[in-house]
Image (tube, grey):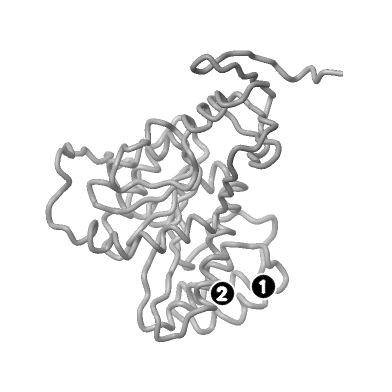
Amino acid sequence: MDNPDKIEKKDSVDGTEYRIEKKDSVDEIEYGTEKKGSVDGIEYRVEERRRRIIVTPGLVLGSLLILVPLSILMVRISPEPPIGLPDLELPSDELNDSDVENRITFGEHSLIERESFDPLLETAIQAIAANEKDAAIEPLEDYLEQRPNDPEAQIFLNNLRSEKSNEVYNIAVSVPISSNPNASLEILRGVAQAQFELLSSRRASQAMLRIAIVDDDDKDPDNENIVAQEVASELAARDDILGVVGPYSSDTSLATIGIYEQSKLVVISPISTSVELTDHSDYFFRTVPSDRIAAEDLGLFRI
């Protein structure tokens, strides 16, 4: 029996027919023998495989590790602004400095709301905030033995170990923790794993990465992208931040891309798929295909 929640739509692209089935929600995108995705909120499924694209949050950081060393020379050091870039009016002071700083952490405070208080994690965070970082390592290790799937705590521990290197570079991960904690945690898990693997494969004399976790959204829909713009302005103003993983949504990427571009800060988004972002900036990259690619692929099949 047909699923009553589905809405079937037939159309064509360049004379090639295709069928779109719309559901109330889309849980995941999967590329394989059965291909699923969405264009403008409409779910599609293709039963013949044309290509295989696997995107993981770890790939985001891996791509950034390749691009950032080049961007240091091309982006953050170049004294001249990009040709043709208009003067950008940065957002007004909707948030005070302390509000913005509270949305960014290397381990000095937590951005994740947890179901219960944990003394081990709290002890570690207080030690980091007091600059007694060696005292934070053991409680973090004990905490992660009990909760190994906590990416924020893992990044805090990775940061402490990375700081023992003679050379450390900082990268920010900008995600909507306040409004979309589950999606943010998934991205942070990939980043934490990539950072851990880098840390495990290098000697203390080699360069390491510290990760700044950033909450670029809040729970008030009326704020639109004001918070994201304020946070982007703060990250762009920091000379020690060499790249940004994020933002999460296309709307947020479009709202902040000018701020990052004016400051010559490289950004790689793991999620933003809007066609408006294609060739929008020399400083914006993404690890997912655009909505145009998905639509064109639909036109290759007859169902």
Which of the two residues, 55 or 47, is positioned nearer the viewer here?
Answer: 47
Disc 2 residue crowd, few under 14, some 14–19, many 20+, Cα 10 Å: many
Q: Amino acid at mark 1?
A: Tyr
Q: Answer with left or right where residue 288 lies relative to residue 123.
A: left
What's the residue at 73%, 19% (across, down)? 6
Indicate the quadrant containing the C terminus: top left, top right, bottom left or bottom right.
top right
Q: Answer with left or right where residue 93 lies relative to residue 155.
A: left
Q: Amino acid at mark 2?
A: Ala
Q: Which residue is mark 1?
A: 143
> Which residue in the rendered view is the most extreme toward the left?
80
Disc 1 residue crowd, few under 14, some 14–19, many 20+, Cα 10 Å: many
Which of the two residues, 108 or 282, is positioned nearer the viewer here?
Answer: 282
Secondary element type, mark 1: helix
- Quarter where residue 227 is shown: top left
Figure check: 274 above or below 4: below
- Quarter where residue 71 is shown: bottom left
Secondary element type, mark 2: helix
Residue 205: mark = none
Q: Answer with left or right where residue 106 lies relative to residue 282.
A: right
In the rendering, at what x and y percent does residue 147 appear? 70, 67
Among numbered discs 1 and 2, the one appearing first in the sequence? 2
Figure check: 12 above or below 280: above
What's the residue at 69%, 16% (across, down)? 7
Instruction: Tell me whether the residue at label 1 lies in contact with that at label 2, contact meaning CB atoms closer than 8 angstroms.
Output: yes
Measure the C-alpha gap from mark 1 to mark 2: 9 Å
- Quarter where residue 274 is shown: top left
Q: Which residue is mark 2?
A: 124
